[in-house]
Image (cartoon, rainbow, N blue to C red):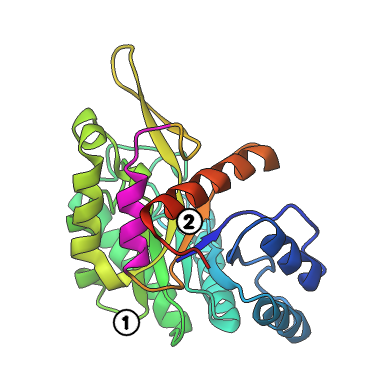
């Protein structure tokens, strides 16, 4: 498998950027160029990626393509199409976004988000995005979330079946699925279910951790890998089973030092259980 994360150098020099990724102990990167990049910029990036034996894990299309505001919704859909087109140009494993929210916060909870009407709206928006690009070597993927679809392996399968497009795959963030004490204490079972049901459709994963705080009512906090209770040994083993280039991307940490600690934990855990990080 591949471990990756943010690289804290100027992305305008792809050779330096990719060399820094390798120096940081990474075998995968987030795409460092934006939609609309020139052909020469794409060529330079791909040459550096090949030189340093890296995988471009994902492009990010972070936006709200089902926003109730028509202007925000159009801008978001346009961004998703452009980001998916970029993923296709650079050969990223996927373009990732959340499904979006019917509420005022693009990634926040809203009572309407877990309804059949919104499920159908997500299907329509994803079809629109994928049909505009028609990717052949990458995929559009929705990140799993705690309070919007897909919020479980089964709801992800239902979405994929309903969308019915070959250019759609899976992005897995198991921490985002831990939305109750039951799932927290049984997160190994949840991880197994994700891989059993979604398996080869998983193109990229996010690496975080989760902690349950001992005060009422229920407080679940995203924390640095190694400081929570996610079953990382199982998680890494199952990622490796998907193939040697499947990425695990570290995210949401405040500074390079924290990323270094997360990287060192994942590397130590991988060595402990015999998982090879490329």
Q: Which residue is mark 2?
A: 70
Q: CA distance from mark 1 to mark 2?
A: 28 Å
Judged by its main secondary structure, the magenta piece is: helix
Among the 4 quarters of the image, the one containing residue 150: bottom left
Instruction: Compare residues 202 and 265 and report the one nearer the observer.
Output: 265
Q: Which residue is mark 1?
A: 166
Among the 4 quarters of the image, the one containing residue 119: bottom left
Among the 4 quarters of the image, the one containing residue 213: top left
Is 108 above or below relative to 37?
Answer: above
**Residue, x 18% and y 63% (percent of image)?**
197
Instruction: Compare residues 185 and 147 and report the one nearer the observer.
Output: 185
Q: Earlier in the sequence, mark 1 or mark 2?
A: 2
Question: Within 10 angstroms of label 2, few (less than 14), some, or many (20 or more) residues?
Answer: few
Q: Is residue 2 visible?
A: yes
Q: Write the start and end of the magenta stretch as one range.
A: 228-241
Quarter holding the N terminus? bottom left
Instruction: Compare residues 219 and 68 and report the one nearer the observer.
Output: 219
Image position of 148 (left or right of 34):
left
Local secondary structure at mark 2: helix
Q: Locate residue 61, reporting x and y percent.
A: 53, 61
**Residue, x 53% and y 50% (percent of image)?**
250
Question: Within 10 angstroms of label 1, few (less than 14), some, or many (20 or more) residues?
Answer: few
Image position of 36 (left or right of 84):
right
């Amino acid at each position: 498998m591949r471990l990756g994360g943010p690289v804290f150098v100027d992305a305008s020099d792809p050779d330096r950027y990719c060399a820094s990724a390798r120096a940081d102990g990474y075998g995968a990167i987030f795409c460092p160029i934006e939609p609309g990049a020139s052909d020469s910029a794409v060529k330079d990036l791909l040459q550096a990626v090949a030189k340093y034996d890296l995988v471009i894990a994902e492009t990010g299309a972070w936006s709200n393509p089902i926003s109730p505001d028509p202007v925000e919704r159009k801008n978001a859909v346009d961004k998703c199409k452009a980001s998916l087109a970029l993923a296709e140009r650079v050969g990223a494993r996927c373009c990732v976004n959340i499904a979006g929210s019917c509420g005022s916060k693009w990634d926040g909870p809203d009572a309407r988000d877990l309804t059949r009407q919104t499920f159908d709206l997500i299907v329509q928006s994803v079809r629109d995005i994928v049909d505009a690009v028609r990717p052949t070597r990458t995929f559009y993927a929705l990140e799993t979330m705690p309070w919007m679809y897909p919020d479980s392996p089964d709801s992800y399968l239902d979405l994929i079946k309903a969308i019915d497009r070959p250019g759609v795959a899976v992005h897995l963030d198991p921490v985002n699925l831990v939305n109750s004490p039951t799932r927290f204490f049984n997160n190994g079972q949840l991880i197994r279910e994700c891989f059993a049901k979604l398996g080869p459709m998983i193109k990229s994963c996010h690496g975080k951790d989760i902690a349950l705080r001992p005060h009422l009512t229920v407080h679940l906090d995203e924390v640095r890998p190694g400081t929570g209770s996610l079953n990382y040994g199982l998680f890494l083993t199952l990622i490796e089973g998907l193939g040697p280039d499947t990425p695990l991307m570290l995210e949401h940490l405040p500074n390079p030092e924290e990323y270094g600690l997360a990287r060192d934990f994942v590397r130590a855990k991988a060595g402990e259980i015999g998982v090879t990080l490329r």
